[in-house]
Image (spheres, grey):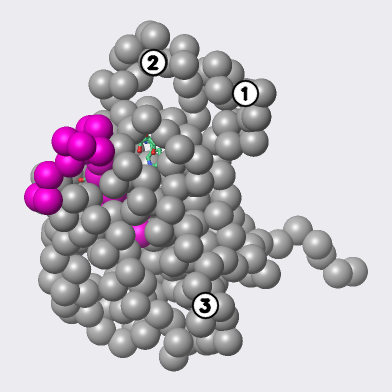
Amino acid sequence: MERYLPSFDLNGKTAVVTGATKGIGKAISTAYAEAGAQVILVSRTQEDLDRLDNELKAQNLKVHTIAGDVQDYKQIIDKVETIMKDQPIDIWVNNAGMNIRSEAEEVSEEEWEQIVQTNMKSAFFLSQYAAKKMKGQGYGKIINMSSVGGHVALRTGVVYAMTKAALIQMSKTLAIEWGKYGIRVNAIGPWYFPTALTEKLLEDEEYVQDILDRTPLKRIGKLKEIAGTAVFLASEASDYMTGQTLFVDGGMTIYGF
Ligand SMILES: NC(=O)C1=CN([C@@H]2O[C@H](COP(=O)(O)OP(=O)(O)OC[C@H]3O[C@@H](n4cnc5c(N)ncnc54)[C@H](O)[C@@H]3O)[C@@H](O)[C@H]2O)C=CC1
Ligand SMILES: C[C@H](O)[C@@H]1OC(=O)[C@H](O)[C@@H]1O
């Protein structure tokens, strides 16, 4: 009898996750390893990489680590090539991202460059590299970490919002270019999750109340809730989805009035 429950496991798959050792990236890379994938953790800090490497290996999970700044995406690519050589890369998650929250009039050129290079430029060129590998395999999953801020206007910085909107559009455009090679390109748009990026904001009771007032589910997200979406987009369960953005947002982006 035909089974209709698709596989959510990632056994035999290799996944690269950038920004993999903290917050959302740590949740995703850990969930991928728990789902059976060999994970390649990319982050800037060797200490953070070693800590997560030890945690995952203690559970007999399959891990490699790469220290590097995604702004120097060529270095990341060289290091991935050194580890992977001709082995397939099935899943690539452009998660690394940062924000400098300021009024538009205050934005300096240096701040612009840092946000744009980290959040957008790196994601494009790392996707370009991943696709070159995946084209030969006839299969691949590229997942870009956007934000609700790429879809609705937030008070948390225009440059950040521009980069997150760009990831949504990049996912759609790459999806139509690479679909014929079996490469699916999707994005995830989180609302607030408790991480280092949002820690200070979420300590402010008034700010949190503002968040909840705009969130039908009346709470911020739990990291396993975004990991679940990332596992879905990495697994065969989403094989007929491409160019989409899944907003994991407690209903925030649909909340009119
Ligand atoms: N936490 C939240 O509420 C939300 C987060 N996001 C997005 O989710 C992604 C992850 O964010 P969080 O886990 O919250 O942030 P986080 O700051 O807790 O972790 C980000 C990770 O990325 C790494 N990273 C930052 N810049 C890097 C660079 N240039 N090169 C290599 N690694 C770098 C950091 O070392 C860290 O491991 C980001 O793209 C962020 O924009 C989107 C919406 C909401
Ligand atoms: C929801 C946003 O992406 C969120 O807002 C912030 O201030 C942080 O920068 C997060 O990215």
| Residue ID for mark 2 | 207
Q: Amino acid at mark 2?
A: Tyr
**Which residue is farthest top?**
205
Q: Marks 1 and 2: in contact by CB < 8 Å? A: no
**Distance from the alpha carbon under mark 2 to that under mark 3:** 40 Å
Q: Is residue 191 magenta?
A: no
- The image's mark for residue 183 is 3
**Distance from the alpha carbon under mark 2 to that under mark 1:** 16 Å
Q: Is residue 105 magenta?
A: yes
Determine whether, in the image, residue 101 is placed left or right of residue 46. right
Foreground disc of the pair 2, 1: 2
Q: Earlier in the sequence, mark 2 or mark 1?
A: 2
Q: Amino acid at mark 1?
A: Leu
Determine whether, in the image, residue 216 is placed left or right of residue 111. right
Q: Marks 3 and 2: in contact by CB < 8 Å? A: no
| Residue ID for mark 1 | 217
Determine whether, in the image, residue 119 is placed left or right of residue 137. left
Residue 9 in the image, given as x and y percentages of width and height: 57, 59
Residue 207 visible, this angle: yes
Q: Residue at coordinates 32% horizontally, 42% vertically from top-left? A: 158
Q: Write down the region rendered in magenta.
A: 94-110
Question: Compared to 92, does 219 lie above or below?
Answer: above
- State yes or no: Cβ of the residue under disc 3 lies below 8 Å from any atom of ligand 1: no
Question: Compared to 185, does 224 lie above or below?
Answer: above
Please tell me whether mark 1 sits on a helix, a strand or a loop. loop
Q: Residues within 10 Å of mark 2 (few under 14, many from 20)?
A: few
Determine whether, in the image, residue 122 is placed left or right of residue 223. left
